[in-house]
Amino acid sequence: MPASTEKTAARTGVAIVGLGMAVAPHAASYLQLEDRARVVYAYSPSEARRKAFAAQYPFPLANSLEQILSDHRVDVVSLLTPPNTHLDLALRCAAAGKHVLLEKPLEVSAARRQALVDGCDRHGVALALVLQNRFRPAAEHLKTLLQENRLGALIGASVSVRNWRTQSYYDQPGRGDKDRDGGGVLLTQGIHTLDLFLFLVGMPEEVFCYATTTPVHRMETEDMVSGSFRFSNGMLGTIEATTTAYPGFPDVINLIGEHGTAVLRGNSLTVALHNGEGIEMGHDDGAGGAGADPMAFSNDLHRAVITDFLDAVRDRRPPRASGVEALKVHRFIDALLSSAQTGRTERVAANPHTTAEGR
């Protein structure tokens, strides 16, 4: 039985594994959530990263992953390592009874993603992905409007991810390589907006896509994508995603319904209904990580993801961005990239059989 199921009243014990670029919003969030969670360990196999982390954050360091996995005080592992390490590390955590909060993406291939989700389910531990855009207040409000059918039946949509990354970003070892990262702009940057889009409106039935690596970057995987998709009810949509759009712009989701239009731009929402009613909420706080500094954003949404995960572990319910949910955006991205390779319209794969319930 996972350790946390025995400790509903005490603070949840957490270990942070992976102390690279992604750790800052996680560490800041755990500091702010000290009444809910206690960081028992932080760990990286790199001594230099351990020392740099210790100079900035007041968390104890572990000397090895084995030290973390054998310690009954650790309930949850925040796993922030490169994508191609996720399967092995997550399964080791799960086998030790540790719940897993995983930085995106799940893994670098469909088979490895499914094995990761199924393995966590088999060991009875919770698994969630850090897909923080689901927790934007403006997005949550739009989800409610859609559930209330305020826009009417949806007939059209567009998704825009216009990021900027310098060549020095891709010069980091493994960055943008298929073996380590699994893909380029869709899997590394676009996944957040695409996941939010699917969270709002569900899964398209088929896609057609072009993908390329532009002269702006030297990298193995794609830095520009242009595609279209169709839903089973006839709703049409388009997607653009790139890391070549200097200096970086907020992501945008446009939804067109029979009764009105909604525009979700970063953290702001604008709704215009045919009856004259208008809704405005949130504010445009700039590119928010879409520019040259991918970590230039508040940790508020990471804190919301972690809070939801802590609640899910305590209440034994699926996290909002569970592993099963995360498989959906991966299937969508796989279909887009497959279409780019084949030059044909591709159907989005049906959800494969799995026993996982996203606990």
Image (cartoon, rainbow, N blue to C red):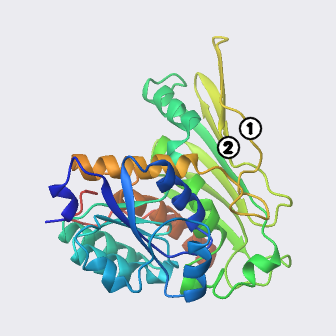
- Residue 244 is tagged as none
Circle 2: residue type:
Gly
Please state the horizontal and vertical placement of residue 326, each as a whole percent of the image. 42, 60
User: 295 above or below 286?
Assistant: below
Please state the horizontal and vertical placement of residue 175, each as a whole percent of the image. 66, 81
Q: Can residue 344 be seen in this view?
A: no
Q: Name the residue under label 2.
A: 266
> Where, by quadrant of the figure, is residue 266 drawn?
top right
Q: Kindly indicate whether the residue at mark 1 contacts the one at mark 2 (C-beta within 8 angstroms).
A: yes
Give left or right: position of 156 versus 62: right
> Where, by quadrant of the figure, is residue 182 drawn?
bottom right
Q: Mark 1 points at which residue?
A: 284
Report the quarter where the N terminus lies: bottom left
| Label 2 Cα neighbours within 10 Å, binned few <14 / some 14-19 / many ≥20 | many
Q: How many marks?
A: 2
The mark nearer the N terminus, 2 or 1, is: 2
Circle 1: residue type:
Asp
What whole-number distance in Å separates the C-alpha atoms at marks 2 and 1? 6 Å
230 and 91: which one is in front? 91
User: 70 above or below 359?
Assistant: below
User: 178 above or below 73?
Assistant: below
235 and 198: which one is in front? 198
Residue located at (32% from left, 82% from top):
67
Give left or right: position of 204 versus 155: left
Q: What element carries label 1?
A: loop
Give left or right: position of 284 versus 146: right
